[in-house]
Image (spheres, grey):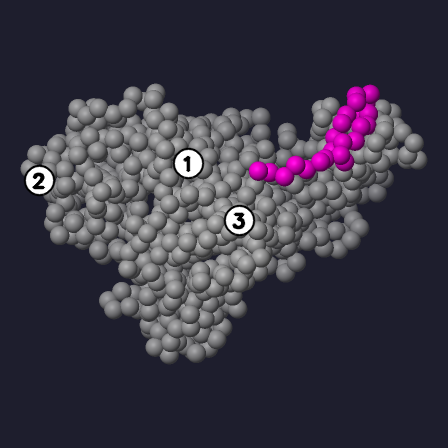
């Protein structure tokens, strides 16, 4: 039962209209009730007032002079005029001041057509400048960092960018340097501006001062065709506006009213778009010949072959000789068709888990974004959400702004700048949860034993009246949908570990891999997966590119990416979100759903009618509830985290922690050349004292070894935030695949080469 809060309302008049708003409302917001458009530059609803630009001047009766609407709170009986001669004159003076040194290079400015300076200049500005002296010039096209270009001459110093960096991300790298007409936006450190949320500043900038490198000079806004859809790069599911011109995606923009993203995007979701038009996309089904070469074949032939191998396998060895892995990157409707088609054949060995994650459902509690924002304690267990679900991490930072403590648990300290404490074990949480009344757990779904411990803690907290919410930040964007829609092993059927083990034992005839790349991501490691694929009669892979796994398959089917198909996904907060096709797919590709519908028809199996898929999928989602930390997923090999983070024996070796990074992965990011500067290079991160014990210095090249398995040429990074006795490496890097290693196993350091020697030898 929610407590009743009495809100005092205030009556005022705006442009002759009676308005009633809660006490404390800013005038600029109150005016929205009568749809009056008060111009703003420095004000933004999510950043609050700054009172810097003065363009929002309004006339308040009885006030001696014009007041700024963005920093004036409403009072009872206030009478406000937002237009008129006096207001226009005030705004005209502000515009003249703002345009004094502005280059007015609208014809070559990317913001042209959607620029507030341009618009308000037309509305309030003078037609000519009275400035007799030359304009002061500032640098143009400054390379601010890997994603952003700054044109200082255009900057009106509204400080939205630096306030975003301070208030929303808490990273505080952007500042205003110098004063008066020499003031410029820069990083405090002088280093390049690096943030996983950098693209947001280009949307916040009301002028053309901050622009994205990926969009500069690509299009005029009026030439873009826009589609509203959902980002499928991670399990958050932020709303996206996708702009396209002449068949090419030019940019993606946030939706400032989106309840999921709170109006923000991370740079992965925003910038990972060039792969759509990459020439390396597969556009024809490809069949491996007995000599190992791929030959192009037609779609009918491809589907017939897939169906024939499935039919023959059922006839000769039974449905147990067939398995399918996928769904975590598919849409709900596609997952449903996949599961229904396979189950119609009697196939039960189905799993979505092609990586390290074991569980996607938050179970009995679940949670909403309001739960997260209003928690007084947020606990992130396992991989930091800043890398697995970046915009969720912004919510955590918001919760911290609201007064929450943020505690991380496991071997991966968060890089989100707002962590109060880092703990090695779930059991260490006892003291932290003691005084909390609203606790939000964010788990990475990887270590089932740790998930079970967290579930137990959540249950005991709920039993004593603590409000509990739980979220799972998945490795694959729609893992939760895949788990809910039947792509999980049931009644003793094999999970992906069991499927690959059966394949290696020569027991599998047909393996279908849909949108997954286990060669790079499955914890069994590339050599075991290769062995499994090579021992299976027929392996089908639906993919966008010839990934490490697709290269080994017998049949590769060219798939469509998220902006090229329509359907829904099931996000980590339990919302079913629409994905809308806004980009024409390359000719020759098919959505996984279309391939599977054709396969079902060829096999003569009955699946749901295409127009009922969404309703069926949604009903199935509603009916599904998997317990958070359900021990049925726990395996002995999962129970490693209790020891991760404890002090390892650094003389003989260190424990390896396999970390996530938003720009790792062998699929869309790897095949997006424009993201090259953002992709992480293979690194090995050590705590200072661990590095000292091991004799490793920052910049050294190190190799990690466990038995026959090696990771070669990792650049050593030394930090104060890494756990002692642990070396952290990044998962999902094609040049240094870490999936040969189990998270938490002990590895030895071999062949440490000093940065200087490595440079001399030309190794870096
Ligand atoms: S760069 Fe843009 S957002 Fe930043 S202060 Fe200048 S005008 Fe404002
Ligand atoms: S947080 Fe996830 S869903 Fe949101 S923009 Fe980033 S990758 Fe896309
Ligand atoms: S918007 Fe009000 S002072 Fe800038």
Q: Position of residue 423 (x, y in %)?
A: 48, 63
Total tally of numbered discs in the picture: 3
Q: Position of residue 517 (x, y in %)?
A: 30, 46
Residue 226 in view in this figure: yes
- Which residue is found at the position 49% from the left and 61% from the top? 429
Q: Mark 2 or mark 1, which is nearer the start of the sequence?
A: 2
**Does the magenta-highlighted stretch encompass residue 22?**
yes
Q: Position of residue 552 (x, y in %)?
A: 21, 46
Judge: label 1 CB < 8 Å from ligand 2. no
Element under label 3? loop
In the rendered image, the quadrant that contains the N terminus is top right
- Which corner quadrant of the image does residue 254 belong to? top right
Q: Which residue is mark 3?
A: 465
Label 1, label 3: how far apart the Cα atoms are? 29 Å
Indicate which disc residue 317 carries: 2
Q: Which residue is mark 1?
A: 570
In the figure, is residue 562 to the left or right of 394?
left
- Which residue is found at the position 74% from the left and 42% from the top? 49
Tell which tag, 3 or 2, sits nearer the viewer.
3
Q: Mark 2 or mark 3, which is nearer the start of the sequence?
A: 2
Magenta range is 1-23
Tell which tag, 1 or 3, sits nearer the viewer.
3
Element under label 1? strand
């Amino acid at each position: 039962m929610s407590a009743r809060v009495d809100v005092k309302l205030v009556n005022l008049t705006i442009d002759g209209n009676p308005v009633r708003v809660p006490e404390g409302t800013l005038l600029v917001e109150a005016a929205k009730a009568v749809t009056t458009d008060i111009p703003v530059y420095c004000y933004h609803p999510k950043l609050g007032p700054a009172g810097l630009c003065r363009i929002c001047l309004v006339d308040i009766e009885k006030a001696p002079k014009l007041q700024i609407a963005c920093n004036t709170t409403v009072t009872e009986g206030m009478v406000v005029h937002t237009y008129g001669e006096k207001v226009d004159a005030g705004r005209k003076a502000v515009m003249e001041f703002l345009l004094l040194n502005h280059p007015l290079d609208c014809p070559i400015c990317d913001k042209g057509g959607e620029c507030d300076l341009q618009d308000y200049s037309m509305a309030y500005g003078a037609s000519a400048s009275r400035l007799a002296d030359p304009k002061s010039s500032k640098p143009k096209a400054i390379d601010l960092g890997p994603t952003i270009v700054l044109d200082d001459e255009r900057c009106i110093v509204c400080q939205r960018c630096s306030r975003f960096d301070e208030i929303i991300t808490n990273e505080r790298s952007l500042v205003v340097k110098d004063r008066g007409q020499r003031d410029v936006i820069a990083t405090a450190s002088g280093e390049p501006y690096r943030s996983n949320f950098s693209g947001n500043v280009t949307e916040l900038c009301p002028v053309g001062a901050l622009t994205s490198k990926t969009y500069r000079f690509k299009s005029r806004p009026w030439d873009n065709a826009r589609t509203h859809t959902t980002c499928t790069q991670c399990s958050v599911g932020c709303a996206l506006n996708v702009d396209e011109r002449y068949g090419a995606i030019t940019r993606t923009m946030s939706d400032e009213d989106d309840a999921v993203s709170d109006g923000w995007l991370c740079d992965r979701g925003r910038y990972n778009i060039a792969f759509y038009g990459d020439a390396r996309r597969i556009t024809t089904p490809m069949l491996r010949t007995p000599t190992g070469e791929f030959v192009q074949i037609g779609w009918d032939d491809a589907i017939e072959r897939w169906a024939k191998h499935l039919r023959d396998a059922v006839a000769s060895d039974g449905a147990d000789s067939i398995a399918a892995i996928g769904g975590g990157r598919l849409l709900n409707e596609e997952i449903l068709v996949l599961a229904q088609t396979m189950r119609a054949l009697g196939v039960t060995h189905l799993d979505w888990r092609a990586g390290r994650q074991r569980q996607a459902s938050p179970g009995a509690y679940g949670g909403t974004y309001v739960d997260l924002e209003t928690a007084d304690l947020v606990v992130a267990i396992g991989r930091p959400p800043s890398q697995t679900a970046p915009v969720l991490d912004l919510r955590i930072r918001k919760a911290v702004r609201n007064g929450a403590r943020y505690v991380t648990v496991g071997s991966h300290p968060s890089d989100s700048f707002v962590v109060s404490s880092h703990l090695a074990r779930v059991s260490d949480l006892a003291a932290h949860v003691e005084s909390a009344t609203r606790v939000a757990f964010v788990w990475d779904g990887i270590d089932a034993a740790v998930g079970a411990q967290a579930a137990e803690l959540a249950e005991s907290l709920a039993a004593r009246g603590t409000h509990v919410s739980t979220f799972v930040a998945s490795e694959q964007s729609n893992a939760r949908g895949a788990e809910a829609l039947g792509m999980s092993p049931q009644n003793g059927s094999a999970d992906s570990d069991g499927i690959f083990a059966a394949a290696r034992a020569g027991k599998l005839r047909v393996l279908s891999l849909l949108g997954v790349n286990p060669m790079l991501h499955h914890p069994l490691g590339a050599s075991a997966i290769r062995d499994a694929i090579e021992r299976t009669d027929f392996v089908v892979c639906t993919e966008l590119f010839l990934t490490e796994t697709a290269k080994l398959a017998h049949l590769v089917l060219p798939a469509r990416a998220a902006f090229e198909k329509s359907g829904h996904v099931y996000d980590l907060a339990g919302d079913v979100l629409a994905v809308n096709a806004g980009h024409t797919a390359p000719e020759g590709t098919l959505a996984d759903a279309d391939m599977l519908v054709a396969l079902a028809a060829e096999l003569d199996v009955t699946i749901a009618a295409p127009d009922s898929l969404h309703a069926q999928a949604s009903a199935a989602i509603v009916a599904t509830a998997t317990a958070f930390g359900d021990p049925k997923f726990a395996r002995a090999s999962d129970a490693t985290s209790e020891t991760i983070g404890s002090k390892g024996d650094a003389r003989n070796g260190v424990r390896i922690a396999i970390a996530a990074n938003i720009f790792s992965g062998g699929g869309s990011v790897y095949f997006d050349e424009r993201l090259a500067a953002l992709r992480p290079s293979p690194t090995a991160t050590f705590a200072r004292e661990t590095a000292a014990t091991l004799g490793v210095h920052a910049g050294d090249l190190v190799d990690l070894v466990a038995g026959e398995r090696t990771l070669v040429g990792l650049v050593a990074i030394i930090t104060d935030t890494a756990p002692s006795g642990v070396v952290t490496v990044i998962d999902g890097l094609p040049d240094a695949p870490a999936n040969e290693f189990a998270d938490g196993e002990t590895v030895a350091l071999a062949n440490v080469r000093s940065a200087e020697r490595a440079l001399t030898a030309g190794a870096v």
